[in-house]
Amino acid sequence: MQELFDSLDRAILMELQKDCARSVAEIGAIVGLSQSPCWKRIRRLEEAGVILGRVALLDPAKVGVGTAVFVTIRTNQHNEAWLERFAAAVRAIPEIVEFHRMSGDVDYLLKLQVADIADYDRIYKKLIRTTELYDVSSSFAMEQIKYSTAIPIPEPS
């Protein structure tokens, strides 16, 4: 994917990750392009699938879901039908904001944003009703030390 973009594209991507609500003219001025060439580059990056979407980032605590929970799941079911059922169940729970299939001792890792421990327990009960799970372990984040949605962008070669 690196061959799809040059140093100007990289600069545009970095600026969009900082604040995508700025105008194309503002972003262009920062990276040294006029509005039209900047817009064409952004459109090309969108069409290539480099830019997946543009969103507003919310403060979880201010919207009532300030407790982050990391859930590790191990299963003894390693077949496609089980995974399809489990993935569908996970996708149907909005409090689960990340879902990863892992290597190593843990099969799946979930990140949830919930109001509190009781709210997590409600989600946990919903989750264990959906599919057979061998082991579920939860850890509650005590403090968020670093948070970023920005993806590091390698320098062009």
Image (cartoon, rainbow, N blue to C red):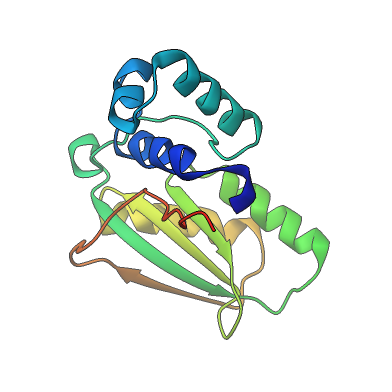
Which quadrant would residue 8 be assigned to in this image?
Answer: top left
The residue at 63%/49% (across/down) is 3
Percent x, y of residue 67: 26, 55
Which quadrant would residue 124 be assigned to in this image?
Answer: bottom left
Percent x, y of residue 63: 24, 35
Q: Look at the image and tell me in which quarter the C terminus lies.
A: bottom right
Q: In front here: 45 or 135?
A: 45
In the picture shown, does residue 48 fall above or below 95?
A: above
Query: Horizontally, is 81 left or right of 40 in the view?
Result: right
In the picture shown, does residue 40 fall above or below 64?
A: above
The residue at 65%/35% (across/down) is 48
Q: Is residue 1 visible?
A: no
The residue at 38%/59% (across/down) is 121
Query: Horizontally, is 38 left or right of 140 in the view?
Result: right
Percent x, y of residue 150: 37, 49
Q: Is residue 57 visible?
A: yes
Percent x, y of residue 102: 59, 72
Q: Which residue lies furthest to the bottom in this view?
A: 105
The residue at 39%/24% (across/down) is 33
Query: Horizontally, is 155 left or right of 45 in the view?
Result: left
State how many labels appear: 0
